[in-house]
Structure formats: structure tokens, C-alpha cells
Amino acid sequence: MRRLIRALGFLAICGVTGLILLFAILWLEHRSEITLPAPTGPFAVGRTTYAWVNDAQSDDLAPAPGAKRVVLAWIWYPSAASSSAAPAGYLPPQWQAAVSNQMGVLMGKFLTRDSRMVHVHSSSDPNLSTAERSYPVLIMRAGGGALTTDFTTLAEDAASHGYVVVGFDAPYRSFVVVLPDGRIATRSPAANPENMPPDGQIPVIDKLLAMWASDTQFVVDQLNRLNTSDPSGRFTGRLDIERLGMFGHSLGGATGLQFCHDDSRCKAGIDIDGAPYGSVVKDGVKQPFLFLLSDHGDLSTPEARGVLNDIESIYDRIPEGGMLLSIHGANHFSFSDQILLKSHLVIKLLQLFQGGLDARRGLAITTAYVHTFFDVHLKSAPAGQLDKLRHVYPEVQSAKR
């Protein structure tokens, strides 16, 4: 019995020591610096932000009745190279604290990189590059409650190829938002389908989709106003809204589909691993669309087969310019900065058992397809440029069954 007690005590000490060592490694990783993938285009990149209030629509997710809808817009753009422009942080200081607090101790302090340690390739508020008279515009939407800045890699790369990229967050729907007056708005429980039982998720998703799609229309309206008269002068006469595209991830991809269905100002779009919802499933879209999917394996569940059926139905009715592709080894988060910012130790352990695509490789594939697809459909680049990518990235396969 004494030997058993000593053995159990030894095992307990080893277990505690192992946990302490694990958390020490995770803490050091959390505090280590990381630089996002460098943009591949010829332009330097600037970033600025706007807060826009939609006086025409109330936000029924807001705690105060009658509160107006608000969007926080992040804009990445081709900039005039300037040594005086300050480098942008991954998140502004107030956002850093709000996001960390909302994530909690385990996720925020151990399993996710400290955003202060994340280096980007944008500068804050420089002038727009004068290399071109005007630039096409891309609307970018994150999935669910994810933040726009989670897709900084994609935004910076597209901007470096001569696009003005506009992403936006919304109070009470995005994970957390810091309003211009310093107030912090977190996602409402009613805006999180994951909180709902399976039979209650679709109504919530449909409601959110309608809100994000109408917000997108409002954002495009605001961009038209900026193009007419930007108070800073930066974008006045420089935004080519006639060459407007949209891309998004997950529910952001579904939002892109619905927006392009609803609004003829959209000329092309990309759905990145997003299940479609809304009237677009029945009606389809008329614009060129790229569906870029993660590796869904054998589609063994009825839900997965149903999603691909809906995607194929939309894809089959696109008049021209449609593409339906998947990336071998990619998962749902291979398209976001989070694949780099979550604990590398945990990701490597998961890949040890499940396999998977290298994080930077997945982002390189995604950025290449995003800017090349829009080059073809918004800048009249040769369609053969898309075909060439299949030789550069053999992981990309047709997802058409």
C-alpha cells in the first residue's frame, strides 16, 4: 500500500510538473513576436478606419431600444510610400485590451498570440498612391462574430495589388467592438447561432445574414459618399465603385453571395468556405463567383452533403466565370490569420494526428486566388492567369463532384 501511495504521489507530481511546463511553453509562445505573411503586390499598404451610423435602420440587437445600426469600417489601400507614416498595429490599443478581456484567460493569455506581438505590413493613414487615377473596391466580410482584422493577411495582399479593401464590424454581432466614444460592445447571445439548439440555428443565421447583407449595401453607399467628398480628401474621386467585388469567409462568404444577389453594383465575388443561405440558394447569382473550399473529406454527413449540393446548385447556374475549388488539407480556419495566431504547439499536435496544410502555405494559396480572380473579373486580366495557379499550387482541386 505504501508503494502504491508513493507511486501515485510521484505520478501526481509528474502531472502537475507537466502542466506547469505546458503552460509555461504556451505563455512564452503567447508573448513571442510574429510577422504576418508579406503582401505579394507592388504597392505599399495603408490602413485607416471610419465609424458610420445608419440613421435609416435600428439595431434590434442593441440593449437600448431604437439604437441605430453602426458599422466600424477598416480600409486597406495602395499607399504612397512614405518613411514618415507610422506602422499600424494589428489592433489599436483599446481593441487589444477589449479582445483579450473578452477571450478570457485560457484562450487570451495562453492559446492565442498577444496581438501586441503581431506585426503587419500596413502603415497608419498615409496618402493614397497616385500611381493610378482610381482603384477598384473589394468588400471583405469575416465569418460569424469574427473580427475583420482576423483577415489582415488577405486584406493587405489584395491592397498591395491595387485594390481598396473595405472590411467592417458591427456592435452586438461582432465578437467585440470598441466604439469611437470608447464604449465596448460585445456580441449579443441572440446573435450567436452556436448558443442555439440545432433546430433554432437557421432562423438566427437567416436574421444575421439579412443584417450583414443590408450593412454591406450601406457600406457601399458610404463609399460612394467618400468618393464624392471625403473629409480627409484621401478617397475623393479615387474609388472606382463600377469595379466592385466582394469576398468573405464562412458566413461572410454567404453574405457576399446574398449581397451580390441583391445588389447589381457587385461585379464579382468569392465565397471562402461558406455555406450559402438566404434567397440566393434558390435564385443563384449572375456575377462571376469563385467558391474556395476547405478539405471536407468524404462528405459523410447529410449536413456536409447538403451544403455542397447548395453550392453546386448556385455554381451550375452562374452564366460564366464561375469556379468551384477546394484546397487539399485545408481546414475551415486555414484562410484566416488565426491559423498563425493560435498556439503553434496545439496546432502541431492536432496535425500530428489529423494531418493538415501548413498555415503559411494555406494563406499563400488563398491570397493568390483572391487577387488573381478579381484581376481577371475587375481588371480584365487574362483568364489564363487562374489556370496557371493550379500548376503553382497542386493542392488546389476541383470540388465539383
Image (cartoon, rainbow, N blue to C red):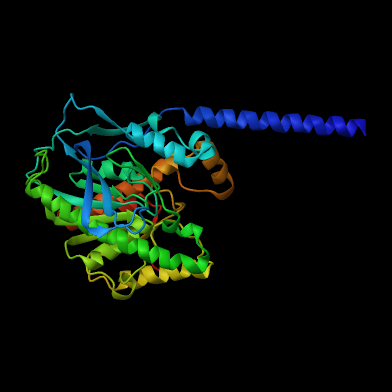
Tell me what residue is drawn at x 23 percent, y 32 percent: 123
- Count the numbered circles shown: 0
User: Which quarter of the image is occupied by the C terminus?
Assistant: bottom left
Tell me what residue is drawn at x 34 percent, y 49 percent: 171
Residue nearest the viewer, comparing 262 with 32? 262
Tell me what residue is drawn at x 41 percent, y 57 percent: 191
Q: Give the percent coordinates (x, y) of residue 244.
A: 18, 56
Residue 290 seen by the camera: no
Q: Give the percent coordinates (x, y) of residue 10.
A: 79, 29
Residue nearest the viewer, comparing 66 with 249? 66
Residue nearest the viewer, comparing 292 with 57? 57
Would you say 115 lies left or right of 290 here? right
Would you say 222 lies left or right of 305 here? left
User: Which quarter of the image is occupied by the N terminus?
Assistant: top right
Q: Give the percent coordinates (x, y) of residue 22.
A: 61, 32
Q: Give the percent coordinates (x, y) of residue 143.
A: 38, 54
Tell me what residue is drawn at x 85 percent, y 29 percent: 6
Q: Residue furthest bottom?
A: 282
Would you say 196 lies left or right of 59 here? right
Residue 170 seen by the camera: yes
Q: Residue furthest top?
A: 84
379, above or below 318, in the image: above
Q: Residue furthest front?
A: 65
274, above or below 128, in the image: below
Q: Residue furthest right?
A: 1
Residue nearest the viewer, comparing 359 with 172? 172
